[in-house]
Amino acid sequence: MNDILFLKPVVKERIWGGKRLNTEYGYQTPYEHTGECWAISAHPNGDCMITSGRFAGKTLSQVYQSNRELFNDLNSDRFPLLTKILDAHDDLSVQVHPSDTYALKHFNDLGKNECWYILDADADAAIIYGHRASSKKVFKKMVDEDQWDELLIKKYVKKGDFIFVPAGTVHAIGKGLLILETQQSSDTTFRLYDYHRKDDQGNERALHIKESIDVATIPYQEVIIETKVHDSKPHRFTELIHTEYFDVEKWEIRGVLHKPSDHYLLMSVIEGQGFINQNPIKKGDHFIVTANVPQIELSGDLEIIVSK
């Protein structure tokens, strides 16, 4: 059988979230501040439901555990990737993510290497990416003394930018950004700084200073990535990143594409509409082309983020 797994996103309330996941993508949400759509996920904190086909009604984790042949017979005990869309109506906290070694030892979770494709950005939108401390001692002193402007590195970003965030990188998504995130399937995050903001009950959110310092890369080491564009007119394919954790590409389809396939692929439609193997797809749809699909036929006017 040629299985394509269409998924129902799981939405998450966040203090920094807005309304764009509903207004822009049509995701149904009961929250006033919706920050995250877990679009392709088998993580226990947000396990997506299959919406059609022979696996309809099952979760992605169930299908992964019982039908490993659909995923190239991976030997991982859990589905390794997670795709999100984030609506940063306000600044996210400054965070650090652990490596696999640290996360598995302390939380029985994977580490969290991730990357961001900027779907949309306000004119002055920025991220925190890296820090200026030369040692853990200096880092801790600057944290203890609230020297955030001196410690944190701010970078302005725009629509179409792509950022790789390795585990250990001090980072934050700034307000006014809409982002598609590809990451390891992990929900382990250490909050280093949250601007002293308070929730509806007047409480500041918990911080994880010790853990952040434990796992942060100090001194900061900038990672330079080079994207590669392949024009195959009328289509265009951009290799965004290749790592041991994930490969991510952007496919721009104009017309009809026939492409052989021998590996499962996570796909998120970020613009346009069309068809995949005669199934209608549109902006905001997310699905997995499984390993038993030998040939992909895409048609329409589409932009898709593809990962594996």
Image (cartoon, helix red, strand yellow):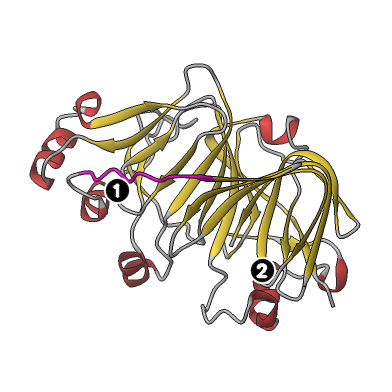
Q: Secondary structure at mark 2?
A: loop
Q: Nearer the viewer, mark 1 or mark 2?
A: 2
Nearer to me, 137 or 308: 308
Of residues 135 and 90, the one drawn nearer to the viewer in this rendering:
135
Q: Identify the amino acid type marked 2.
A: Tyr
Q: Which one is earlier in the sequence, the residue at label 1 or at label 2?
A: 1
Disc 1 residue type?
A: His
Position of residue 203 in the picture relative to residue 47 (left or right): left
Camera sees residue 303: no
- Residue 209 lies within the magenta run: no
Instruction: Report the side of 298 relative to 236 (left or right).
Output: right
Q: How far is the residue under mark 1 from the one under mark 2?
A: 36 Å
Q: Quadrant for residue 140, please give it.
A: top left
- Residue at the spot x=74%, y=62% of the render? 49
Q: In the image shown, does 266 or 300 lie closer to the viewer?
A: 300
Image quarter of the N terminus: bottom right
Query: Regarding mark 1 in the picture, which secondary structure is present there?
Result: loop
> Counting other residues with Cα less than 10 Å from the Cα at mark 2, is it few (<14), some (14-19), or many (20 or more)?
some
Q: Is residue 221 magenta?
A: yes
Which residue does the numbered mark 1 point to in the structure image?
208
The image quadrant where one finds the C terminus is bottom right
Image coords of residue 229 (percent x, y): 57, 44
> What numbered label is drawn on residue 264?
2
Q: Which residues are magenta?
A: 220-228
Seen in the picture, residue 120 relative to 100 is either above or below; the reply is: above
